[in-house]
Image (spheres, rainbow, N blue to C red):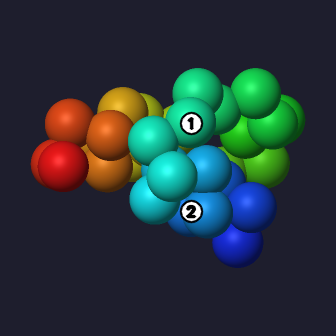
Amino acid sequence: MRRLLKSLAKGEEITQDISTLEDESIIKQLQEAD
C-alpha cells in the first residue's frame, strides 16, 4: 500500500499488483481526487 500511495503522490502510473486491495476502485478515486 505504501508503494501505491507513493506512486500516486508522484503522479506515476500504477504498475504494481493491486489485486490484494479489498476495493481496487479506490486507486482510480485517489487519482481523480488530485
Q: Residues within 10 Å of mark 2 (few under 14, many from 20)?
A: some
Left or right: 31 as drawn, with respect to 18? left
Q: CA distance from mark 1 to mark 2?
A: 10 Å
- Residue at image position (83%, 35%) is 17
Label disc, if present, on residue 12 of the rendered structure: 1
Image location of residue 16, percent across then percent down: 81, 36
Secondary structure type for disc 2: helix
Q: Earlier in the sequence, mark 1 or mark 2?
A: 2
- Residue at image position (74%, 61%) is 3
Q: Amino acid at mark 2?
A: Leu
Image location of residue 30, percent across then percent down: 31, 49
Secondary structure type for disc 1: loop
- Residue at image position (70%, 72%) is 2
Nearer the camera: disc 1 or disc 2: 1
Residue 16 or residue 13, whichever sits in front? 13
Task: Write down the residue under mark 2.
Answer: 5
Q: Amino acid at mark 1?
A: Glu
Left or right: 14 as drawn, with respect to 34? right
